[in-house]
Image (tube, helix red, strand yellow):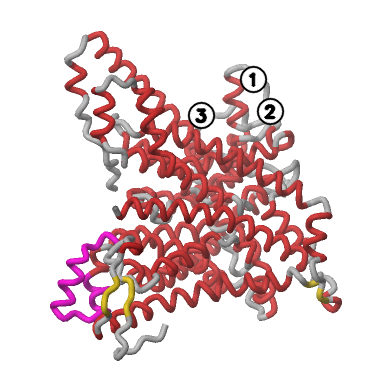
Amino acid sequence: MSTTVASRPQTTQPARQERSTSRFTRRKVTGYLTTLVTWILVFLFFFPMLWMVVTSFKTEGQAASFPPEFIFTPTLDRYAAVFERGMGLYLLNSLFVAVLSTVVVMALAIPAAYALSVRPIGRWQDGLFFFISTKFLPVAASIIPVFLLLRSVNLLDNLWSLGLLYLGINLPLAVWMMRSFFAEVPRAVVEAAQIDGASYGRELWRVALPMVAPGAAAAALICFIFAWNEYFLANLLTAVVARTTPPFLGSFVDGRGQFLAILSAASTIAVLPVIAAGWLAQKRLVRGLAMGAVK
Amino acid sequence: MSTTVETTPTIEAPRGGATGRKAAKVELKGQDLAERKFARKLIAPGLVVAILITQIPFLATIYYSFQDWNLARPEERSFAGFDNYVAVITNGAFLPSVWATIRIVGGSMILSLLLGLLLAVLLDRNFKGRALARTLLITPFLVMPAAAALIWKYSLLEVNTGMINWGLGLIGIDPIAWNTDYPAITIVFTLTWQYTPFMMLILLAGLQSQSGEVLEAADVDGASNLQTFRYMTLPHLRTYAELAILLGTVFMIQVFDPVNIMTKGAGNTKTIAYLLYERAFIGQQIGEAAAYGVITVIVTIAIATAALRTMFKIFTEEAR
């Protein structure tokens, strides 16, 4: 996990040290205090996740007790209960849809982004503009006809149709991320390959793509995360067979008795893989989130 | 675009980047032509899929919005003119939903932007474990929104056992019935928590793109930290903040997950997206819901156009 943050060299420090010592110590104290405040804020922001994981190892009784119990004997009982409720199927469904849509998205996005950045055709900005504009088109624009069409051809509650719709969500994001990575491939490298007589296809798949492989992995990961987390379409278009994890989580909330520990266990299972993946890709994450506008 | 080899047409050739406007017109040779054919072949599949999945259904939505069509009575479908749009504006549900959307999205936006700025400034300095702090801070954005909404509602904001009320109790504040008394605020909390990392990352990228030399010069000239921040850093961050706000708005304006999970639209939380869902899939009023869809798109396009302009501004600066 490489998590270094590029920083400006702190060249101002030596100059300051020459000034009076009291000012220097005051600066040092301010520095420690700032760091302390930073860590307090970090803790508060991370606390909901921490508490969710802690609660998932409690019994329902412990989870509902107030004031909260901080010291208890952890149990995996709620995790077992989650799978008894059939979460395995929903996790597999989520995995299938997310992997399927990500693979297809990348297969479509890599060539398009390459054409838009390394080999710009005339009026390439129009092409870019179109791709990003589809990201801004709200689901509200298309959901009614899509729903009616799927209903009339009996493709509701179907993993393939859900995966197809996730293409529409992730394609612009992937094109934009890949564009910003391809834009950094030195022109000279591509031209050298040309002179060596490489075909255009070879130039893309064998020369340019390997150079942006880490970026492509990050883009794929982000597409996977968005598909894995998607709730609106999954909730609306799936019911039993093709139910995915996000709408399933809500089913733990029922009027009958306590559910906090089992809900926490299910949520932990649902979010942990994505958080781990996101941590790995975080260096390139910001670029994807800002759709390539920020490096 | 039909181009034959004999006529050797000219194209703009922006070499490797966003210098389109200044590009010289160059003669197109046979090899370039093959290259362009190849480029079009590369783009076409993605373009076709994007059009099929997003554009064509939208055309259908526009068509439906002019139909009088209730799923419960499918045989009575007929042309309605602008009746659906009139109904949307006059039925008393639309304006409150616009207000709910503005209050929820606006509130979350301001809070997450301020918190994001604070955290970005705090992270833009050297301290032990900075990478870990950043890693932990981006986590909320990765969390499945459905899980975030459920955990906030039942684990953190619950009136009797929630951790927020426990924390407030430590400093002597009586328990607050967040979920029943302040439903809109519970959604704002959840959205703010999820979007602060997004704001922070963009603003941090902005801070780190600031030239160290300029800041040093300000320090040598005797500017205080506060002065440097106010007169140099903030203006520099403006473009990044604009981008963060616009992208955030475009994503948040579709907010549905926390509304459906936490409030079901109760207590002034019926956003436009939720209203459309309710009308179309619970009320089965296809025509009217389609009209909501079209209006949502118009509003989003207005915001998105501004977002795109900001992004291209950054691209052109970047290319210089």
For the residue carrying disc 3, how many other residues have a C-alpha within 10 Å: few (<14), some (14-19), or many (20+)? Answer: few
**Quadrant of the rendered structure where residue A16 is?**
top left
Residue at the spot x=55%, y=47% of the render?
Answer: A78
Q: Which residue matches tag 2?
A: B176
Q: Secondary structure at mark 2?
A: loop
Q: Amino acid at mark 2?
A: Ile
From the top left corner, tell me how far across and down residue B158 is, in percent.
Answer: 65, 35
Q: Which residue matches tag 1?
A: B173
The answer to if A204 sits in the magenta stretch is yes
Tell which of A104 and A47 is nearer to you.
A104
Which dot, 2 or 3, sits closer to the camera? 2
Q: CA distance from mark 3 to mark 1?
A: 21 Å
**Quadrant of the rendered structure where residue B107 is?**
top right
Q: Amino acid at mark 3?
A: Phe
Q: Main secondary structure of the magenta part?
A: helix
Asked if one can make out residue A280 in the rendered structure from this viewpoint, the answer is: no
